[in-house]
Image: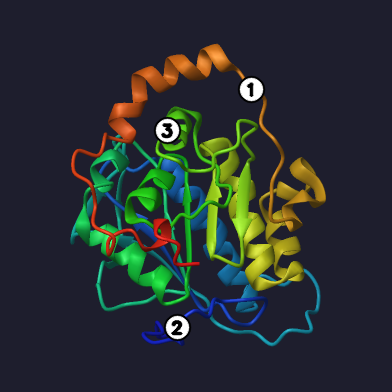
Amino acid sequence: MTTVTRETAEGTRPGTSGVVRSIAVLGYEKCSEQDTITPLEIFKGAAMVTSGGIAPWQREAAPRELDVRLVGLTPGVVTMQMGTQVVADSVLDPDELFDILYVPGGVGSGELTSDERVLALIRRHHQAGRVVAANCSGVGVLARAGVLDDSPVTCVAAVARGLRAEGFNVPVGRRMWIGNPDTGIWTATGSYGVHGGAVAMVAHYLGRETGTIVSMMFDTLSGLGDVIFEEVGPEFYQHPELEQSFQDYFQDMLLPRVTDEPSADALPGREGRR
C-alpha cells in the first residue's frame, strides 16, 4: 500500500497525472450508500487502472499505486442511511493527509456539520493544499468547515436554498458537478451527479487516458459523453415547487442552523484567504 504523504508545501495542490497518490472517502453513521460507495468504487477502479491491473490496451504511463480508502470516523462497522453495514479500510487518523479528501452526503451529514474532528480535518487538508471534495449534502459540511469562498459550487437541491441564504454561490441552474482546480474544491449534486463528478475528478487528476478507461468501465462516457473531461458538468433541470417542498422537509436535518457565530480562525475560506 502507498504511504500517505504527511507534509506538503503550503498552497500547492495536486495537479495532473502522476501527482495524486492517495484518496480518502469518509464513512460515517447514516452516510448515503450511493454518495459514498459510488465514488469509492470509481476511485478504486482508477487505482486498478494506474497499477496496471486493468489495461485494455498498452499504456505509455508506467504502473503506479494509488491508495484509495474508505476511512471511518470510529473503529468498527459503519451503518449507512438505508441500513447497509460496511467495514472501513482504515480509521480516521488526524495526522494523515490524503491528496484528495472526499466527503459524501447522507442524512447523517447534518450532525457532521458540527463535528469538530471532521471540520478540522477538512480545514487541515485545504490549508495544506490538498483537494477537498463533497457531494450532495456533504457540501454543507465543507461550508461549515469554512473552506468555500465565493466561487460557484453545486449540491443537492435540499440544501441549496440554505447555502444560498448563508451567502454561498450555488447557481440556480445547478450543475451536475463543479470543479475548481485553483481552490482545490470539487462539489457534486445528489446521487445522480455523483457518478459523473467522480469520473471527472479521475480524468482531471489522473489523466485523460485513465479517465477514459474508467469511464468505459462504468459506462459513463457513453451516458454523458466528453463532458466528463470538463471541470463543470451538465446543468440540471429546475423544478422550483418540488425543490421547495424538499427544502422545507430536509433543510434543517441536513444543514442545521448555525446558532453561534464561528470565529474567524474557524472560517479561513470566508475571510478572504484567497
Callout 1–callout 3 Cβ contact below 8 Å: no
Label 1 and label 3: CA atoms lie apart by 18 Å
Q: Which residue is mark 2?
A: 10
Disc nearer the start of the sequence (2/1): 2
Mark yes or no: residue 82 visible. Answer: no
Q: Which kind of residue does numbered mark 2 sit on?
A: Glu
Q: Secondary structure at mark 3?
A: helix
Residue 115 at what x, y percent from top left? 21, 52
Q: Which residue is mark 3?
A: 165
Q: Is residue 93 above or below residue 203?
A: below
Q: Is residue 238 above or below residue 69?
A: above
Residue 104 at what x, y percent from top left? 42, 49
Label 3 and label 2: CA atoms lie apart by 32 Å
Which residue is at a point 52% across and 76% down the rendered structure image? 66
Point out the frontmost of discs 2 and 1: 2
Quarter of the view holding residue 82: top left
Q: Secondary structure at mark 2?
A: loop
Q: Is residue 101 above or below residue 192?
A: below
Residue 221 at what x, y percent from top left? 76, 50
Camera-nearest residue between 142 and 109: 142
Asked whether, in this view, residue 238 is left or right of residue 251, the answer is right
Which residue is at a point 51% across and 37% down the rendered structure image? 190
Q: Which residue is mark 1?
A: 238
Q: Secondary structure at mark 1?
A: loop
Number of marks in the rendered image: 3
Which residue is at a point 35% across and 27% down the rendered structure image? 251
Mark yes or no: residue 50 visible. Answer: yes
Q: Residues within 10 Å of mark 3 (few under 14, many from 20)?
A: few
Label 2 and label 1: CA atoms lie apart by 40 Å
Q: Which kind of residue does numbered mark 3 sit on?
A: Ala
Residue 241 at what x, y percent from top left? 53, 12
Q: Which kind of residue does numbered mark 1 sit on?
A: Gln
